[in-house]
Image (cartoon, helix red, strand yellow):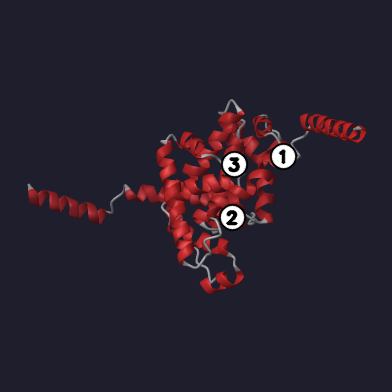
Amino acid sequence: MLIWKRIFRNVISYLLSVGRHGASATVKSRRFDTEAVLKKILQHDKEGFSSFYERYRGRVYRFIVRQYGTSEYGKAAYYSTWRHLVVAGVDSKTPKELKLSFFQYLGTSVGSLMAAQRLQEQTNYLPRDIEQDENWSLALIEHMKQLGDDQKRYFLFKHEIGISEAAIARTFSVKRKAVHACIDAAEETLKSSLHEAGMPHKLSLEKVYRESRVVKPPHSWDKEILESFDMWIRQTDGPASRAVKREEPQSGEGLAGKWHQLRDQVKNKLSSLNRKSPAKQSRDRKLSSSHN
């Protein structure tokens, strides 16, 4: 009986100590309170940003490159997403608002910018190699290319970013039924394609996708993101941000340069769609006069 009492006291002491340490844990811990860290980002705290980046960098990286590839445009999208987290703090009043803005930008703004420059990268990894190595996660990533835009986006928000279907629906102001239908269709398409390719039925889609989550952004990307924090903070300081913008890297210099280059290209492409060449304008006038 005395032994059990001693064990019970030790367990209680351990739980109390965990509670005390948990209450005073800093944001350097990998298991931190997301809301507390986002609050620090709202206060322009670099440590808070670094901690949030450490937790989500792999998820965001995989979310982007599995839709747009690892080309210069994929890099620019990655850069602009993290920049948005910092500058969105100006208009966000609560951690919840900031996180919502971050996910909305990741799911819509980045996607619309990248649509014109989407890169479907090819692989030389053959089906027989996949079957031999039993690395079906590579096959899964290849088969994801056949999914529709919404199917791919919602699938990645659920399985990669890790938010519920209800949260996805609230983030993008769509019905939960629509989100569920897209994710269900994506999962069924992927399972069917993988089984046809020879994947054993005992393997679940969730397990295969988890095995693909070892991919992380290159160290050079991490370095540039973290070093850009102070510059982004200066850009949120109102009138002073104008001077900072003139100091930003020019086109072709790092991720920031790629982002500006991409933005200019998209703007030019949209503008060109609304303009007609002189020859076409002349033809239009002739056709119009012939009908009068």
CB-based contact (under 8 Å), mark 1 and mark 3: no
CB-based contact (under 8 Å), mark 2 and mark 3: no
Mark 2 or mark 3: which is in front?
A: 2
Q: Which of the labelled discs sits on residue 207, or is there none? A: 2
Quadrant assignment, res 220: bottom right
Find the distance from the CA under tag 1 to the CA under tag 2: 23 Å
Find the distance from the CA under tag 2 to the CA under tag 3: 32 Å
> Residue 112, how many percent across, how many down?
44, 46
Q: Which residue is mark 3?
A: 83
Q: Is residue 257 above or below residue 241?
A: below
Which residue is situated farthest in the top direction here? 93
Q: Is residue 6 left or right of residue 74?
A: right
Mark 1 or mark 3: which is in front?
A: 1
Residue type beneath disc 1: Arg
> Residue 53, how many percent across, how many down?
66, 43
Q: Is residue 185 left or right of residue 245?
A: left
Residue pictured at 28% horizontal, 54% vertical: 277
Q: Secondary structure at mark 1?
A: loop
Q: Which residue is mark 1?
A: 31
> Residue 148, how many percent across, how many down?
41, 52
> Residue 59, how many percent across, how many down?
60, 48
Find the distance from the CA under tag 1 to the CA under tag 3: 23 Å
Mark nearer the N terminus (1 vs 2): 1
Mark 1 or mark 2: which is in front?
A: 2
Q: Is residue 165 left or right of residue 272?
A: right
Residue pictured at 67% horizontal, 50% vertical: 222
Residue type beneath disc 2: Lys
Residue type beneath disc 3: Arg
Mark nearer the N terminus (2 vs 3): 3
Estimate how packed mark 2 is, as few (under 14), some (14 to 19) or many (20 or more) residues with alpha carbons within 10 Å.
Answer: few
